[in-house]
Image (cartoon, grey):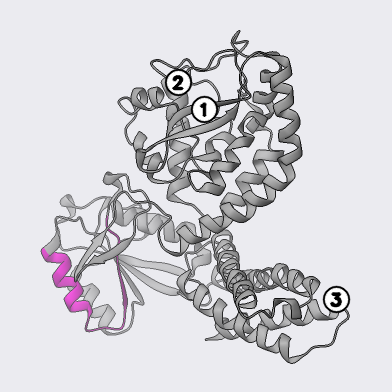
Amino acid sequence: MGLRTADAILIGLAHLIAVLIAEETWSDLHTEASIVGAVVFHFAAQSFGLYRPQRSETSVRETGRVFGAWLVTAGVLLLVGFLTKRSTDYSRLITLTWIGLAPLLVALFRAAVRKVLRTARMRGRNTRSVAVAGLTELGERVARVIEGNLWMGMRVTGFFDDRYEERCHPIPSELGKREGNLDDLVELARTGKVDMVYIALPLRAEARVTDLVRRLADSTASVYMAADFDAFDLLSARWGQLGNVPIVSIHETPFYGVSGWLKRIEDIVVGSMILLLIAIPMLFVAIGVKVTSKGPVFFRQRRYGLNGEVIHVLKFRSMTVMEDTGEVKQATKNDQRITPFGAFLRRTSLDELPQFFHVITGTMSIVGPRPHAVSHNEQYRKQIEGYMLRHKVKPGITGWAQVNGWRGETDTLEKMEQRIAHDLEYIRNWTLFWDLQIIFLTVFGRKVRKNAY
């Protein structure tokens, strides 16, 4: 309840500061807007998971969630103002200042609270005792995460298993020791000596897990199932239900529901702003292409988009050829097919600018895996496991692989594997804040120019 109240107060405080900066007087209009903003943010923050227990959450991810929830809130506020025809009653300066300041105050406050709590937990305060059910490799991994992140405020009190010692996975002594069997664990939980239980038994031990969970229901301990799904190479895994049947997604897009709307809003807002900035430069680039070499200004090539559907990607022509069928040869260093002006365009990525039209129309995103020519897709999907999973999201103008230097020619399989690994890492861990970081690195990063030819 405390964080909800603090968020509402900070949203109102940001609005008050914005009014004072504009040297205006607080009015009922500002009160109404603050109340609506706080209420909408409450529900948006709830959907973004900002009010769940977050001992294991990182500050970066929480900040991304705050800005994501406020982006939704700001969109709703602007929409309400437009529909009620009251937007003209508000100062643009106050509105823009408030929209920029509110998430900053909320994020800074949460970061400060998290810092205080983490410092206290590092010193042994505000901690919770953890028991690990299962002397398994997974149990060791759970303990290592806990012991390696003392700021989470958890301490491993011991391991519990019913099996003989020779059948158990050896646990390093620095992580803890075997304190008994599962009966002993249940008894400790019933007497309140254990706050949290992580069940790290193998998936095949369904009967033992079911029995343990049933018996732990006679305690107040928080129980978590540390299922070992790593063998499935999870992609945006999440729990859900099919009717009344619990399910877990193995391969799924991260852009469903609120996240999907947030990603689309980002593309429309940021993409429109960029298009306004690059309209004149694009005109000069088009003239440059036309006067420096024979052929059309634009080049359209078939590539795979979302869900593997074929899309036609638009670029400024940078070569003397227009390859799009059969075997498409990748550009190489000192490639004779590249025009002198085209070399400049490719080195600076200016040849990609027309793709912002695809962003606005919805076939591409600003950030995402770079689309490959259809022939390259068919080649590498047979050689790299999980290659097609990059098409669970829209292709992007820039991406995590590109800002880390994995762009340009892939003359070895290892280079393409690194590109795909970065693409899948992005899909697994996407946040709005990460998108903004990638956009920044695309413009100012050093590695993004690597292999640009």
Q: Tell me where residue 270 appears, x and y as whole percent.
A: 64, 52
Residue type beneath disc 2: Asp
Give the spatial CA distance, label 3 vs label 2: 56 Å
Secondary-structure class at tag 3: helix
The magenta segment: 207-227
Front tag of 3 and 2:
2
Q: Tell me where residue 16 appears, x and y as whole percent.
A: 77, 82
Secondary-structure class at tag 1: strand
The magenta stretch spans residue 213: yes
Q: Is any part of residue 241 visible from this angle?
A: yes
Note whether 413 is above or below 124 in the view shown: above
Q: Tell me where residue 271 appears, x and y as whole percent.
A: 62, 49
Residue 300 is tagged as 1
Query: Which residue is labeled 2 in the image?
Result: 324
Query: Which residue is labeled 3 in the image?
Result: 21
Q: Is any part of residue 366 visible from this angle?
A: no
Residue toward you, 109 or 191 = 109
Residue type beneath disc 3: Ile
Residue 199 is tagged as none
Q: Is residue 33 left or right of residue 365?
A: right
Q: Does label 3 or label 1 sit earlier along the sequence? A: 3
